[in-house]
Image (tube, coloured by chain):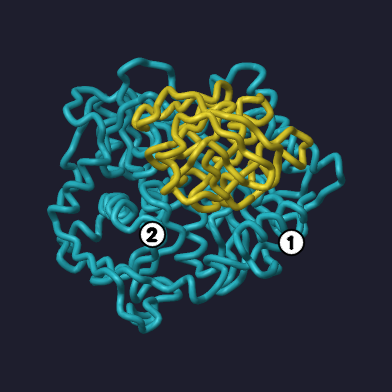
Chain colours: A cyan, B yellow
Amino acid sequence: MAMRIVAETARLMGAPRLIPIESAHIDGALYHGDSGTLFAEKLVAGGAKTAVRATLNVGAIDLTGCSRNRLPAHEHGMAKRMMTAYQQLGCEATWTCAPYQAGHRPRLGSQVAWGESNAVAFCNSVLGARTNRYGDFLDIACAIAGRAPDYGLHRTENRRATVVFDVSQVDAAFLFSDLAWPVLGNLYGRLIGNAIGVITGLSFRPWEDILKAFGATAASAGSVGLFHVAGATPEAPDAATALQNIPPADHIIVTNQMVRDAQSRLSTADRADRVDAVAIGSPHLSLEEFDTLRRLLNNRTLSVPLYACTGRHVLKVLERDGHRQSLESSGVVIVADTCVVVTPILPEKPGAILMTNSGKFAHYAPSNTGYSVLFGSMAECVESAVAGHPVFGVQTW
Amino acid sequence: MVTVQAEVLLRGPAAQANALALTAPISFWGGVDPKSGLIADPRHPEHGRDISGKLLLIPQTIGSSSAAAILLELVRAKRAPAVLALHEPDAILLLGLIVAKEMGYETPIALRLDRRWFGELDGRLVSVSDDGSISI
């Protein structure tokens, strides 16, 4: 059945053949309705097993018990059955949207089948492995078949940048801040859509967590599956290489005004006098980001809950080092295996306001949670959670 | 009688249906309610329209990779369109039908049809045969 699904997709997309893959990242174990659970259980009943390493993206339930959700009994039961079925198929219970920080890092040039938009963008762009944007059902089908249709981003000629995204005119101090990258990602996603761009004009080498934030925001604002950063990402030692020595179709010069506009677009509740909750961790927080959170929090007590979403790979270390307890006693709610925009964790509260430093949460929270959104830096998020009202200007540029 | 020949992307039964042309790209996840078949995105121009049992004319799909899960859920609930016609094939959405077939559900036919026909078909009662010809 898995091979039939892969072959039928190949036919539909005009792929001439299937290619072997080395690994998969499975986004299909998030519950959207009973049929997804029944599909996974049908694969289990047929004796299917993954042929390659397959990590799991978030599910609808925090199996670690760190956080609680408000799913009705039937949905909760079916979501849990779904998560169990995917593990029975041989997938690893990683339950994270940052598998690349949980030890799953395919090598440069390897062929893989990854799902979840931020994971796809990171895998292609930062690791230089090759994947299309795999959706529900096809991701697990490829993992079981060990093969994927050969088209799109699997092929070298389709990985060429056609647009230059030049940030040399943007304030240098701003570019060096954590605030800049979701903002640039939003701008990039909206302007470039599903084309491939190369970012030029940076005077430093961007670190992993800001590339993660950039890719996640770009992939939620547009259909970005691959971006290049000249001098930083593996297929772009320089812009000309990323362009495969062909002149770009478009050259976007980013101005400070464009950046300010993009930043204000990320908020939907501009003149808020209070904050009801703060959420960080989309994509899931790394250990380094938790270090930053603890440093900014500095043992103070929060006025409103701060939801910190992460994977169990990070939770394990937090528990080992005694940080989970100290964070929770400050008022931080650690959310593992899932996150606050894919399952109902935030309390139902009409007119409520959520503050976040995540461009992806900012994109999905209004429609998925009913909360309106204030976007700010990690420092501004922490200060606002302590004060209970928005505090801006903590980290200025 | 006018007949338009569309390309069959995925086989399914012939149908008589009212055509509904979407005038903006749609994201099935978050854009269509999987239980009712109503267009749920308040920013979509066809917000509130029912896609169940229709010849649904789709100019472009956008957004989440979970579109297939929503389409599969619609098929299972018997709230799917009777015919899907896409301007361009989209693996993420059509996987919902490929999987529905594997699950033994009765699945609609999917066609590729240039969007220049959409305006003419919109709102009309049409007959779609299993070879992809559409007759008004």
Few, some or many C-alpha atoms within 10 Å of disc 1 (few <14, some 14-19, many ≥20)?
many
* x and y percentages locating residue A234 in the rendered image: 45, 74
Q: In which quarter of the image is residue A265?
A: top left
Residue positioned 55% across, 50% down in the render: B112
Q: Residue A211 carries which label?
A: 2
Few, some or many C-alpha atoms within 10 Å of disc 2 (few <14, some 14-19, many ≥20)?
many
Q: In which quarter of the image is residue B126?
A: top right
Of pointers 1 and 2, the one earlier in the residue sequence: 1
| Nearer to the camera, A303 or A133 | A133
**In this image, B76 relative to B49: left or right?**
right
Q: What is the count of numbered marks?
A: 2
Q: Residue A158 carries which label?
A: none
Q: What element carries label 2?
A: helix
Chain containing mark 2: A
Q: Distance between the residues labelled 1 and 2?
A: 29 Å
Give the amino acid type for the residue marked by disc 1 in the picture: Gly
**In this image, B49 relative to A256: left or right?**
right
